[in-house]
Amino acid sequence: MLDALAYLTRLRVGQRRGHPAPNKPCLLLAIICEIQTGHVASNRVILDARLLARYHDIYEVLTGERHKASAWLPLWHLRSDKGPSGKLWSPEYAEKVAGLASQLGQPKSLNQLLERFRSARLDPVLFSALQDRQSADEACALIAQCYLASDPTAYEDLLTYLETALASGEYEKHPERLKGNIQESHKKYARSVAFRSLVLEAYDYRCAASRLRYITPDYRYLVEAAHLIPFSESQDDRPVNGLALTPNLHWAMDNHLIAPGPDHRWHLSPTVDPLVADNRWLWELDGLPLVLPRDPQRQPAREALAWRLDHLER
């Protein structure tokens, strides 16, 4: 074991029902997963929706109580732990509170914490170690065994989640590997997880048709990742073969009632009667521009859009 990883077994954690509280361990697992996806690319960790959603996902897998995750607690208290070269976690305080940091009490909500800081530095020696896949695997195993193994069933579920998360991270770093026929079910699932993550992030969790964007307080997203050319036909999980859509519009596209075209506009099937009031949520989309990712490399492939338009119900 690397010396740097030993510090992960020395966290100052509280007690929950007679066992180590899961907050700090779950936060560190979330950070490790995001390092392995390439989303956290330096030891400066941004407290964005993606990291917070990952933390809530892990907390839910372990406890079944997503609404009790209280992300501000580990984000605040992790600053008291030591790392291999100094503090394990060093918040980058907003200018207005920087001089008062030592006097501030525990924040009472995530919003209150985010008013104090929106990024923090992970110990650089630890970050360097966690960039290596083998070390990341070992770090996750250490944290899980040390703090999160009291419930055997939840522990096994956690290990399964982490195995998939780390495997999908490899695909997120190399999205070109997301196309091609595969047989192993675990690889298919890891690819599917990577597809969802890459697509939703590319669209900033906003529907490519309705423009609706909503993230719940416990970091669930309204939108889903939808394939343009179905995976069964294309074996293509690259983000250029996907859109972020609300569930109802995902259903409508999969049933060929609406389609995005190469002209980057939405098209309506002529089978949808615009004179029927109940169809308004569909016919109002006709001709509207497609919401596109800012990153050109994540924008939908022209051939995938053409496939959708060709398969519009006539």
Image (cartoon, grey):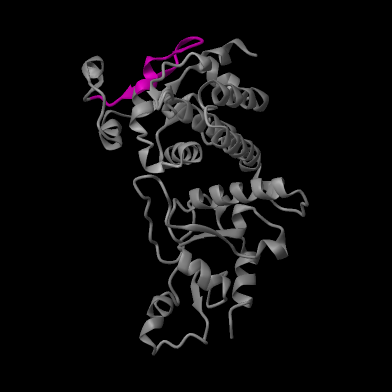
Horizontal relation, residue 135 to residue 78: left or right: right
Judge whether residue 260 can be spotted in this image. Answer: no
Q: How many marks?
A: 0
* Residue 196, position as x, y percentages in the image: 56, 51
Q: Would residue 249 be seen by someone viewing this image from the given angle?
A: yes
- Where does the image place residue 152, in percent across and percent down from the top left? 57, 32
The residue at 56%/36% (across/down) is: 158
Vertical placement of 215 versus 261: above or below?
above
- Queried whether the magenta region covers residue 303, the answer comes back as no
In this rendering, the answer to whether 109 lies above or below 198 is above
Rendering coords of residue 136 (x, y %):
61, 26
- Within the magenta stretch, is there residue 79? yes
Tell me the magenta residue range: 77-95
Q: Quadrant of residue 287?
A: bottom left
Determine which quarter of the picture holds residue 119. Answer: top left
In the displayed structure, does residue 154 sit left or right of residue 11?
right
* Residue situated in front as seen by the camera: 51 or 179: 51
Task: Give the answer, above or below, for where 99 lies relative to 31.
Answer: above
Residue under the point 39% across and 21% down: 78
Q: Residue at x 49, y 72 (%)?
A: 266
Q: Position of residue 291 (x, y in %)?
A: 45, 61
Quadrant for the N terminus in the image: top right
**Image quarter hosting the C terminus:** bottom right
